[in-house]
Image: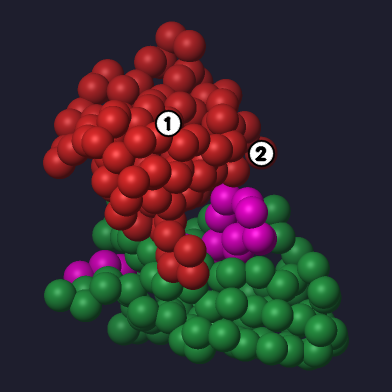
Amino acid sequence: DAGVTQSPTHLIKTRGQQVTLRCSPKSGHDTVSWYQQALGQGPQFIFQYYEEEERQRGNFPDRFSGHQFPNYSSELNVNALLLGDSALYLCASSLGRQGGAPQYFGPGTRLTVT
Amino acid sequence: GESVGLHLPTLSVQEGDNSIINCAYSNSASDYFIWYKQESGKGPQFIIDIRSNMDKRQGQRVTVLLNKTVKHLSLQIAATQPGDSAVYFCAENESVDQFYFGTGTSLTVIP
């Protein structure tokens, strides 16, 4: 049973550039949530995708956007990168969009902006 | 945003002892909670969950207690092992899709 996978593992970008991170959900899951985790902090919710639509969004600017594909995999795009975007980006998958479903996390993508 | 906080940022225990990690939350409407374990360089790992209609739930070596009156959550780990050393997060579900995480408690198990 495949767990949540993310790519790439690490990424280094320059300020102002754009980045795309990828996530494949756990087998059987149809919902993908993205989180940003700064060093020493807990994960912060960016947004969630279900049925190829963004269903809820956290307190992140429009520079952060995403997409979900028919096979439930998802991408997170960040434009005009800032130094403060350096963080671990986590993808979590779950089943359905009803509240109270456990979310399972991938290993994350470590983004460094220089 | 909601406040999900932990009483102690660090906790050290002797191997074989029991560990208790505490978490306070502020949204009385939250109805689902998860404890996660995060080891260095890895994503959070699901440990155990509990819904608001319960006050206790047990897993393998772990027990979660929920006190809705004082909005407090705890994770008890029995017979703590070196492999339990990690950062532990409580996560609160206050809406359909979004979880709020606390800042985490770093557990160190002393052999």
Question: Which residue occupies 35% across, 36% down?
Answer: B14
The quarter holding residue A82 reads bottom right
- Secondary structure of the residue carrying tag 2 is loop
Q: Are marks 1 and 2 on the same chain?
A: yes
Nearest to the eye among marks 1 and 2: give it. 1
Residue B21 in the image, given as x and y percentages of width and height: 42, 31
User: Quadrant of the image for the C terminus of chain A?
Assistant: bottom right
Q: Is residue B34 above or below residue B8?
A: below
Let me know if residue A39 is in the magenta part: yes
Camera-side residue of A29 and B76: B76
Is any part of residue B79 visible from this angle?
Answer: yes
Amino acid type indicated by mark 1 = Ile
Question: Which residue occupies 52% across, 25% down?
Answer: B24
According to the picture, the residue beneath numbered tag 1 turns out to be B21
Question: Which residue occupies 42% across, 72% down?
Answer: A107
Q: Which chain is red?
A: B
Q: Which chain is green?
A: A
According to the picture, the residue beneath numbered tag 2 turns out to be B1
Which region is colored magenta? A28-44
Q: Chain of mark 2?
A: B
Q: Residues within 10 Å of mark 1 (few under 14, many from 20)?
A: many
